[in-house]
Image (cartoon, rainbow, N blue to C red):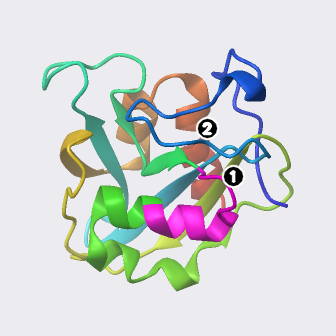
Amino acid sequence: MIAMVADDIAESPAELQTTHDGLPISQEPPFGVTVVVRAASPDGTRYLLLHRAHQGPDYEGDWAWTPPAGARLPGEGVGQAARRELSEEAGPDVAAFGATLRPFPGEAGEWARFLLDVPWGTPVELVDPEHDRWEWVALEEGLRRCRPEQVADALRVAADLA
């Protein structure tokens, strides 16, 4: 199983019953997935970040900018959860590349992380109202925006994967 420990989860797995919108969360790890989406732009590698709408459009604190991510449903496979999150958060054009998801190597724990390379110019569509905008950013900008640190770490690890 490919996953990582999510330091941001303060509650025990038994307490993590539902998501913010009432969906059940798997009681078996990994409890969720992150998919780092990257593309080779004419100006270098860019990473897809989504801005969460929960605190308004000007919010820039913890969890404001993240790659596509979310909880794994009970009985849902890890890869299936990653593809579902891609479809819900980045739209069908990005999700169409879901068959080429690559798990981060050598990780085991409570949160699975994947890398997805897509062609530059792949349309992004915000399907879920959880996010109010998206941007393709350079690694340095992504590391600056993504907080807490484990969110930025997903970009850092992805940047090292060929």
- Circle 1 sits on which residue? 112
Of the numbered discs 1 and 2, the one sitting upstream in the chain is 1
Determine if the magenta segment contains residue 3.
Answer: no
- Residue at left offset 22%, top offset 49%: 134
Image-quadrant location for residue 161: bottom right
Q: Position of residue 102 (x, y in %)?
A: 65, 72
Q: Position of residue 103 (x, y in %)?
A: 70, 66
Q: Position of residue 127 (x, y in %)?
A: 21, 58
Identify the magenta region: 72-84
46, above or below 28, in the image:
below
Determine if the magenta segment contains residue 80.
Answer: yes
The kind of residue tagged 2 is: Asp
162, above or below 27, in the image:
below
- Circle 2 sits on which residue? 153
The kind of residue tagged 1 is: Ala
What is the CA distance from the residue labelled 1 to the residue labelled 2?
Answer: 13 Å
Q: Nearer the viewer, mark 1 or mark 2?
A: 1
The C terminus lies in which quarter of the figure? bottom right
Badge number at residue 8:
none
